[in-house]
Image: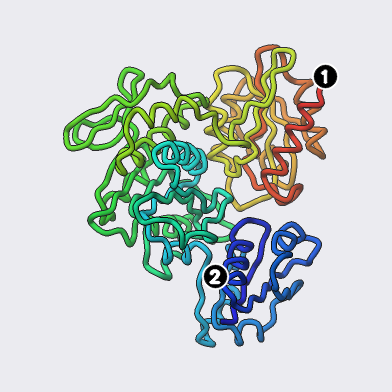
Amino acid sequence: MNVTVLGLGLFAGGVATARFFAESGHKVTVSDLRDASTLKVSIDALDDLEIRYVLGSHRDVDIIDADLIVVGPGVKEDSPFLRLARDSGVSVTTEINLVFELCRAPIIGVTGSNGKTTTTSLLEIILRDFDQRSVVGGNIGKSVLNGINHVPENTLVALELSSFQLQRLRWIGRSPHVSVVTNLAPNHLDWHGSFEKYSEAKFQILRDQQPEDFAVLNADDPVVASWAARSNGKVVWYGTESPTRSGAFVREETISYRMHGLEQKICQVSDIQIPGPHNVANTMAAISAAMIVGVPVSTIKSAIKRFRGVPHRLEAVRTLDGVRYYNDSACTTPESCETALGAFEVPIVLIAGGYDKGAGFAGLAQEIVRSAKAVVLIGDTAEAIEEAIGKQQSDPMPSILLADSMEDAVSQSRNMAENGDVILLSPACASYDMFDNFESRGEVFKSLVAALN
């Protein structure tokens, strides 16, 4: 076939797709609006393959003459090239759709506005301890497309799924066997256009489930909880205990799991090594999925005790002069920043700000006033966050400082912090205004903190 990869991108999906088809003997054209220097990392990863690159623009001929178009997440629904493909009768798919179509093993899908990576990462340790053949990837940064044909049907595949991936999963009418939804809050409104459209994209994780499938839902998130009425699968809850519900809950600092009226103690809350009540919820989500697929309690408990979290998600970096530094660069929404602020019971100096995805900052401003002694703002949204804080009525108010670089932000934060405080990078915004991605932003922060003396 002639296969056109529309949007190579800088993440795993585009590279995996190009490699998958090139290694299968198909003629692959990669078309991306960015130039070769911007895409160097992705192109270098494919330099052992015969692939034709069309960079800096998309051409009609590469759409019309293709037998298959594989669309990257950066290509929006209103793209004229996506419309041209459909009008020309060319088949269109995505990397994650190919995974669902080719995978013979049961799929556990994890989504949510916040917490999905932590949940998936903990689930990865649990599943690999249970069966070393288990496969984990998706939006977590590891495509599983290359090699999916070799995954045996009697193992498990766990995928973190973004709203972009889920929206297009509807094209093939598929949902995971076990679907975990952590929470829902406005995100990626610059791409989806509204919270309602974003929510409906996320709902695809449940939409095409069958009665033999499972929906693991957060009982304490009103939007997610409301999805139970729309679910075709068996609903399993986690969160606040209710004697009539199956799932995971906390009672007297013990996490238990109830199914068919039988309760099993899984672990103590104190066994969880990552801070914050939200990570107790993430742990319960992973427990629920693992119990559904038959992982022994001892395996789950052992994995929870060993799990130290995910890089760039409330990652402990260093303690210097009695001040603890945390890297939460993966925090790209106001709601996730609010959650991070609530994870500590000591004074916080917050570093926030970045690329504007269209979210509002009123709720975040309220939490900053409650939890932070000072905030250092960077990036495109600095003024908007400052304005939102200024509208709060509180005494005292946190100090507000503006920084023109991460180095400046770290320096100013250190000057504001005292023994016993926490300095927290939790931007509440995407990184694209100053960095290639949140990983780059987090690594810069960590290197600056490491250099302090």
Q: Which residue is mark 1?
A: 453
The location of residue 71, given as percent across then percent down, is: 57, 70
- The amino acid beneath tag 2 is Glu
Query: In the shown orientation, is residue 331 left or right of residue 58?
Result: left
Q: Is residue 164 visible?
A: no
Q: Residue at x 75, y 20 (%)?
A: 416
The location of residue 130, given as percent across then percent down, is: 39, 38
The location of residue 213, given as percent across then percent down, is: 28, 53
Q: Is residue 132 visible?
A: yes
Query: How is the protein colored in the picture?
Result: rainbow
Callout 2 secondary element: loop
The label number, if any, that marks residue 77 in the structure image: 2
Q: Quadrant of residue 295?
A: top left
Q: Residue at x 32, y 33 (%)?
A: 296
Q: Residues within 10 Å of mark 2 (few under 14, many from 20)?
A: some
- The amino acid beneath tag 1 is Asn
- In the image, residue 184 sits, relative to residue 92, either above or below, namely above
Callout 1 secondary element: loop
The location of residue 36, given as percent across then percent down, is: 79, 66
